Image (cartoon, helix red, strand yellow):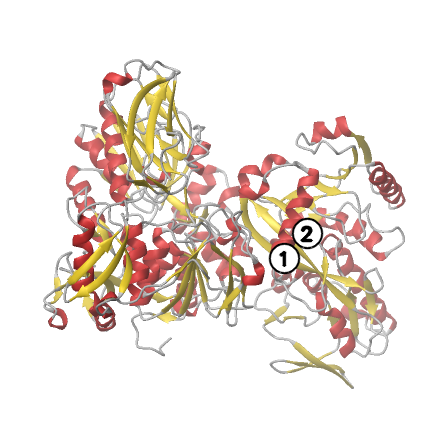
Amino acid sequence: MVGAAIFRELCRFPLRVLLLDQLHDVGGGASRANTAILHGGFDPLPGTLMSSLNVEGLRLWSSWSRQLDVEVEWCGSLVLATDDEELAAIGDLCLRGRKARVPTVFLLRDALLNREPNLAAEVKGGLFAPVSGLINPFQAVIALVGNGLANGGELALGERVLGLRKIPEGIEVQTSKRTLPTRFLFNAAGVEADHLMHLAGEDWFSITPRRGQYHVLDKSIGHLVRHVLFPAPRKLGKGIVVTRTIHGNLMIGPNAEDLDESDLLTTREGLQAVLAGAKKLIPFPFERYLVAQFSGLRAVSSTGDFHLGPAHAFPGVFHAAGIKSPGLTAAPAIARRLVEMWQERMDLAGHKEVIAQKMDWDPTFRFPPKLSECSLGDRDRLIRENPSYGRIVCRCEGISEGEVREAIRMQPGATDLDGIKRRCRPTTGRCQGGFCTPRLVEILAQERGAPLSSITKFGEASRLTWRDNREPSGCE
Amino acid sequence: MRVTVIGGGPAGMAAALSAKRAGAEEVLLLERAERLGGVLPQCIHTGFGVSYFKEDLTGPEFAERLERLVAKAGVEVWLNSIALQAFPDRQLLVSTRLGLRALRPDVLIFAVGARERPRGAIAIPGDRPAGVFTAGTAQYMTNIQGLQVGREFFILGSGDIGLIMARRFTLEGLIVHGVAELMPFPGGLSRNVQQCLRDYAIPLYLSHTVTGVRGKQRVEAVTVAPVDPNGYPLRDQERTYAVDSLILSVGLLPEAELLRQAGLTMAPETGGPAVDQYYQCEREGIFAVGNGVAIWDLADNVAETAEVAGRAAVLCPPGRGWARVEGRGGIRVVIPQRWRLEDRDLVLHFRAGKPTIAPRLRVTCKGQLLARRGYAALRPAEMEEIRIPAEKLAMVEAGDLVVLELEEGSGG
Amino acid sequence: MDKEERSGQISNLSPGDGITLTCITCPVGCELEVTLEGEGEVRVLNNRCPRGVDYAVQETTAPERTFTSTVKLRGSSLERRLPVRLDRVIAKARLLEVAEYVRTLEAQVPVTMGDVLQDDLLKLGANLVASRSVKE
C-alpha cells in the first residue's frame, strides 16, 4: 500500500518511475491481509509519526477514495471496556484523541447498546470515534498503481532486490532478473524493509514480523455489528477486532504472534484465540458461520514508530519502514511526506524542473463497471452492449464473466486466480471458489492464450493443475 | 398457468417435466450454465436412474434422458440464465446474455441444488497453497475440463463424492494415500466405501481429521491425526502424508440464499427451506425441490421430490391447514417439516443422527401413536422413510405437532 | 491407527483366508465375515439375510464391476471430453488395465449417446460406448 501510494505520488512529476515487487501481483504482502480499517487516529501516542500520519492519512483517504474509485464506508468505530481498568485505558485514549484533534465521544453502556445491540453483557462503556471506517484494501493498491501507470509509470513484478551499489549516476540495483541503474530508490518493502535498509548500509533498525490470524464469516451475520469494534488497548497491538468487510462479511481478528521468520500459516490455537477474543465483545456462535481464514504480517519496528526519511549513508535512497497499523490509513500521508523530503533535496540541488507537477497529470482512476453497484437499467444496458456481463460466473457474489475479463484486461491486470479475486472478488463468497474456480481458469486461459493447465493461484509454482489428463505424460 | 423452474439439474428438469405433464401451459426452465444437467454431466459413474428410469445409468446418460423428455414435452429452456433475486410475491429478476428479465410466474419452483462445504467452513489450519479442492470441483476439472488436478492425494471426509473421486483418481493412474473421516462411521453409502475404497485398497481412517496443510506454493504435505470422542485431534499421534493435493468431501449444504431472500422460512437442521409433503414452502405458489431442500442420497431421490412438486404445483387445491413435523431423539433430519392436511398416506423422509442397529421408530401426535416401524439398521449416510396411513392421520388438526423419534430401549 | 481399514484384492485370497466385506445388496450394509474354505466355497458370518451369502460368493469367486471413464473429444467447440462406459460389467481385476488403455482413446463429434466407440474392448466381451451426445 505504501509503495503503491509513493508510486502514485512520484508519477505526478516528469520522472521515469518503476514500481518493483517481488510477488506476481501488486498488494500481495501486508496490504492483502489486514483488518481493512481506516483508523480514527486516537490510538497512537501523540507526537509520534504514527499519530500525525494517521490523522493526515485519514483526511487524504476521504478525497483519494473518490479520486481513485476506492470503496470506503465511514461507519465509525467503538473501543469497548469490560472492567474499570479498561475504562481507565479508554479515558487515556480519549485524551490522546483530544491531543491529536480526533473527535471522540465517551459512551456508557445504554448509549452503546443503541449503536450496537449485540454487545456482550460485560461491556460497560466505550469510546466512539465517528470519523473512521472500512476500506477495500485490495482495490486501494490496484487503484494507486493503476493511477501511476496511467500517468506514465512502469511496473515490474516477480523481481526481487538482491543488492545495491553506489555508482556516479546514483544507484545500481541488482535484482533477481537484471541490473537496474536509478537515481533514486524508495524502500517500501513492508516486513522486509529492514533488509533493504541493511543493503543500504543501515543496521540500526530492525523489523519483527508480527503475525495476526483472522476468520472471515458469512454475510448472513454481517448485520451483527454496525461499527468497527475494538477491545480496550493491550500491549500487543489493538487486540481482536470485530468488524465487517466492505462487502458485508463479518471479520474477526487478529491475534498477535511475534515471529523470528515470516510465516503466513494459520494455526488451530491462533484461530481459536481469535474466536474467543471476538466473543468477549459479541457473544455469538461464530464457528457456525466460518467462510475463510487467513493470516497477515505486521511490520513491527524496533523503534516503536514508523521510520521515514533518506538513508543515512546512501544518497538517493529513501526509506518507509516499520509501517504497521495504522499504516494502511497513513499510507497517503506517508507517501506525501516522503515525496516532500525528496522534493526538498531536489530543490536544494537546484533541480526545480523535476519537482513541478506534470501538466497532464490525472489524479483519477476508474475501475471497470461493477454490476452489483449498477442500477438495473445500467446493468441491462451493459449486458446488451456486452453479453458476457449477463453471464454470472460467481454466483455467491454475483460477479459476471464480463467483470472477470475486465479484471484481466485492466492495468494492472490479473494474471492468476488471486489477482482476479482481489480485483472483482469471485472465490470470496460462501463456496470459496467451489463453483467458479473452473470457470475462472477457463477465462484466464482464454484471455492469456495459454493452456488451462498453466493457470496458477498466485503465480510461480502455485499451479492449480498439472496437465491435460489425456495428453501423453510430460506434455503441458 | 405459468410455471418457472430455477435450476436445470435433475430436480429442475424433473419438476419442469412433471408440471408440463400435469397440464401447465407454459413451463420455463432457467439454467445458469451453458448446458442442462447440473452436476450430472460430471458424475460419469453409474448408479443413476435405477428407480426413475429402471436402469443403471451414468450421470451424463441420466441427464440426457431427462433432457430429451424435457424437450419433447415442450418446456422452454433458457441457458446461461441466472436468477439474481426472488421476491415473496414470486417476482424474479433474471440475468441472461440478452439482458435482465423480470418474471412473475404463477408458480415458482426452486431447484437450486447444493454447494460443497469449503476448507474455510471447517477452518483447516496451515498454509494456503494451491492444491486444496472440494471433491465436486476436482470432479468437474477432471471429467469435464480434462485436467490432472494432482498426482498424489489425501481426501478428507468420506462423503459420496469424495469416495467416488478416490476411485476416479485411482483409475486415472494417480495415487490416493487415504481418506480421513472425523466421525466414527463413513459419511457416504456403504456400497461406495466398498467399490471405491476397498476395491483399490485405499485406507479409510475413521475418527481422524486433517490437522494442517503445508506448502507455500502448491500443497506439499498434509498432517492427519486421530480425534478424541469430542472431535479434538490428538496431535501427538499426528502423521504426515507427502501429497500435492487435499480433496475435501465434508458435506453439502442446500444453496439457499435466493430462498432466504425471498422471505421463506428456513429449517436449521437441513439448511434449506421448510416444506410440506408437496415441497411447497411457507408461501403459496413457491416450491423447493431436490438438494436445495435437503441433501438426498441419490439423483433419483432428487428427481422424485421434483416430480411430486411439479404435479402438485399444477393440480393441488389450496390447503386447509398445516401441522408441524419434528424429529427428536436420534432423528437428525425430517422432510417434510409441515404436513398439509389431507386424506392420504404421508411418507416422512428422515436421517438418523448416528448408526443404530435394529431400532424401532415411532410417530406420534398429541400422545397418540400414528405409526411404528422397526429397521434392521439406520445410518446417517442413508435417508430412510416411514409411511403413516391416512386413517391414522385423520385425528391430526391444523397447528398440531407430529413427532418422529426412536423408541427408547430400541436399537444398539 | 486402530481404526484403519485395509482390504486387498479379494481375488488373491487362498483357502483359509478370511476377509470382511460390506454387503452392497441393500442399505443395511452387513459387515460380512467371509472365509474361503476351498475352490469357490465360502463360509459367511454376520449376514442378516440369505442375500449376503450370494453376494459373498459372487464377490469372492468372480467379482465384477462397471467401468466408466472419459476420452478426449475432437472437433467440439463446447466439450473437451466425452464420458464413456462399458456396456456390461467386467472382471474387477481388469479395471486398472482397462482404465489405462481407455485413456489413450479419442472420439470425434458428432457422437450420440450409446454409440459404440470400440467393440469387444481388450477382448473382454464388453463394448465401449458414448455416455452422452455431443453434436458440435
Side of C60 where B78 appears, left or right: right
**Residue A339 placement: quadrant:** bottom right
Which amino acid does the dot numbered 1 rest on? Answer: Ser
* Residue at (69, 69) in percent of width and height: A261
Q: Secondary structure at mark 2?
A: loop
User: How far apart are the alpha carbons under marks 1 and 2?
Assistant: 8 Å
Point out the image quarter for the C terminus of chain C. Answer: bottom left
Q: Position of residue A427 (x, y in %)?
A: 49, 53
Residue C26 visible from this viewpoint: yes
Q: Position of residue A259 (x, y in %)?
A: 71, 65
- Report in which chain the residue with disc 2 lies: A
Query: Where C6 falls versus A55 (above or below)?
Result: below
Q: Secondary structure at mark 1?
A: strand
Residue marked by disc 1? A295
- Report in which chain the residue with disc 1 lies: A
Which amino acid does the dot numbered 2 rest on? Answer: Pro
A408 or C33, nearer to the observer: C33
**Residue C118 placement: quadrant:** bottom left
Disc 1: CA contacts within 10 A as few (<14), some (14-19) or many (>=20):
many
Residue marked by disc 2? A254
* Residue at (77, 29) in percent of width and height: A109
Which callout, 1 or 2, points at the residue further toward the start of the chain?
2
Q: Which mark is residue A441?
A: none
Query: Where B178 falls versus B400 (above or below)?
Result: below
Q: Position of residue A133 (x, y in %)?
A: 70, 43
